[in-house]
Image (cartoon, coloured by chain):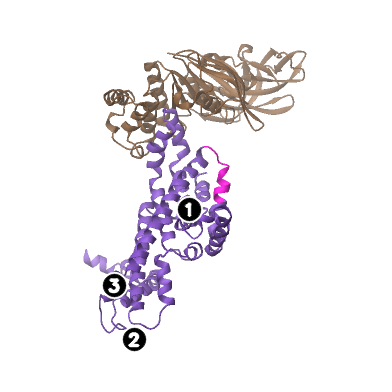
Chain colours: A brown, B purple
Amino acid sequence: MSGVDLIGVTKVFGHVRALDDVNLQITSGEMVALLGPSGCGKTTLLRSVAGLERPTAGRILIGGRDVTSVPTRDRPIGMVFQSYALFPNLTVRQNIAFPLEVRHRPAAEVKARVDELLELVRLVPQADRYPNQVSGGQAQRCALGRALAPSPAVLLLDEPLSALDALVRTRLRDEIRRVQQLVKTTAIYVTHDQSEAMAIADRVAVMNHGKIEQVARPPELYESPATHFSATFVGSRNALELPVVSGRLVLGGAFDVPAPAGATDRAVAFFRPEDVEVTANGQGHPATLEVKIFLGSTTRLHLLTEVDGRQARFYADMPSRQALAYEPGAKLAVRIDPADVKTFALE
Amino acid sequence: MTATTATSPGRTREPLRPARIGQTIMFVGLFTYFTLPMVAVFLYSIATRWTAHILPDGYTLDWWVSAFTDQAVIGAFGSTLVLATLTATLDILVVVPAAYWSRVRNPRIRTIVELSAAIPFALPYLVIGFGLLQFSGIVAPALQGTFPLLVLGHAAIAFPFLYWAVDGAMAAAGIERLSEAAETCGGSPAQIVRRVVLPNIKPGVVTGGLLAFATSFGEFAMVQTIARGVYTVPIWSAEAIRSYSGESGSFNRLAAVTMVNFVVLFALSAAVVYFNRGQTVRLLPGARSIEQREQG
């Protein structure tokens, strides 16, 4: 049982700062997702914890022990890769046994532990198959078993679901979470998929340009993004750029909120599609319905409106039954509760 | 049933399609072109006399017996085998670690390795051999004209085949990823090489080793330049032709030795194709960049 402390971790490749003074504390047994677009440094950070990258500056502590200059093989970690990286010459069972065998554990102990892990990742029937004889989902479960075999202090997962198709992805995501909570290991999970990050993690660290922008529990991150980038990247949000008029941001009759601190000329207002209140002839800001997208229980309306003399588009979500009343071309009125509008100064 | 098949126009006409006839002619032609010389050599090696007719006048195994009881021939085969084995072994010991190192630790040495892999193709072996002779004269005069220098020379001209085979196998296995994964599993460098790297590139090493062996086995110019005292099969064959003075059976014995030489090299080529299971194209220079493009 041990957490991970990242203190001022910086990594410079040539003149690119892949990691820029990253600080993060992960408590024991917690799963933290590193979320961000490609090139944001999330994988470099994970590889630094694994020892596959050597940080240019900063310290990495696992269970309070400084491992910054400890080689990968001596770190108490297990890692799952996007590309599975199973050993093709070994069976599922032998792959899971590998980390134990290289540590020269007694054969009886290895066998008992491997049996236990095969059970845990539900691969008993496939135990004697080779990696090219199992499905992608099974391969990744094998990789999970292999990573957990030596009971590592930290489990590192590098986009483990990216190579899988959609159906397997959600199932394996829940499986990874179940296993991680069962063995109570600390885990770092790298992904570029915000819904995956929010579904699996105790906390999500949003990364951009080598920095952590915000660390928060998923509901908190969803409700109150702390930065402009978090707001853009997490949840599907409407973003409207509005002029600041006497310290306020106003969208016709839809909302009227105070402008963010530091914004003088223009600012961005974020609001979620489900918070847009649409009426056919009520009060609010006029908008025209362009397209209706049926999403199952909800329907998304693509609305066209005029903001500051220019055309702007945004989305509104509503229960599908209610959306039946509207047809494309309909003139509607929208309102958004000022409490649901987040504003940020333009970057 | 039979009636339907017989009256079906598509089926009856198919064997007469011009493209198929063309292919068959091409194949038979090429096959004859490649095999006829070997058949002729073989017939000559078992012919009593072959001057007047399209086929030999009679057959005998005498030439084979006399060739392979000749101490010079046995000695030539012996030193050729030792030379080729040492060349392939030396190349494997040097090239496999170098290819691994260039992939996992230091991609910058790739440029140097690939450049030197092009040299045996850009320069005639005679020139390389002469260069080696000059160079060894400066740094190690004691080596001049010796068997070890010849092994070094052959290792230098044969290594590109091994390098391309091994590098291709490493690319196909994704050896960098596997090495990293093994590292996160707690494997030491020795454990990673023995349990992960070697088992997954074995076909490449075997293929490359066979190609290096074959290169050395049939090489003539360099043996002639670097080590005049070393008597290999190609040297024996060349001298058999050069010293011919009309005595009976000398060319027939040469045909027998050539036949054995051919069978050895053919068996090696067949083994190469077998170990690569239809992916022999990966052994060609530049195949790696094509693969990368396909993956990307």
**Where residue B19 sits: x, y (%)?**
41, 69
Q: Chain of mark 1?
A: B
Question: Which residue is label 1 attached to?
Answer: B159
Q: Is residue B272 magenta?
A: no
Asked if residue A345 lies left or right of residue B188, the reply is: right
Q: Residues within 10 Å of mark 3 (few under 14, many from 20)?
A: some
Q: Which mark is residue B51?
A: 2
Q: Give above or below for B11 relative to A308.
A: below
Assess whether residue B108 is covered by the magenta stretch.
yes
Q: Secondary structure at mark 3?
A: helix
Callout 3, which amino acid? Trp
Q: Nearer the viewer, residue A53 or A147?
A: A53
Label 2 lies in what chain?
Answer: B
Compared with residue B263, is residue A21 higher up or lower down, i.e. above or below? above
Is disc 2 on the same chain as disc 1? Answer: yes
Asked if one can make out residue A298 in the rendered structure from this viewpoint, the answer is no
Q: Measured along the vertical axis of the image, is residue B258 above or below residue A277?
A: below
Residue A161 percent across, percent down from the top left: 45, 30
Q: Residue at x 47, y 65 (%)?
A: B228
Whether marks 2 and 3 lie on the same chain: yes
How packed is label 1: few (under 14 Cα within 10 Å), some, or many (20 or more)? Answer: many
Q: In the image, which residues are magenta? A: B105-114
What's the amino acid at mark 1? Phe
The residue at which mark 3 appears reads as: B64
Q: Earlier in the sequence, mark 2 or mark 3?
A: 2
Q: Earlier in the sequence, mark 1 or mark 3?
A: 3
Classify mark 2: helix, strand or loop: loop
Q: Amino acid at mark 2?
A: Thr
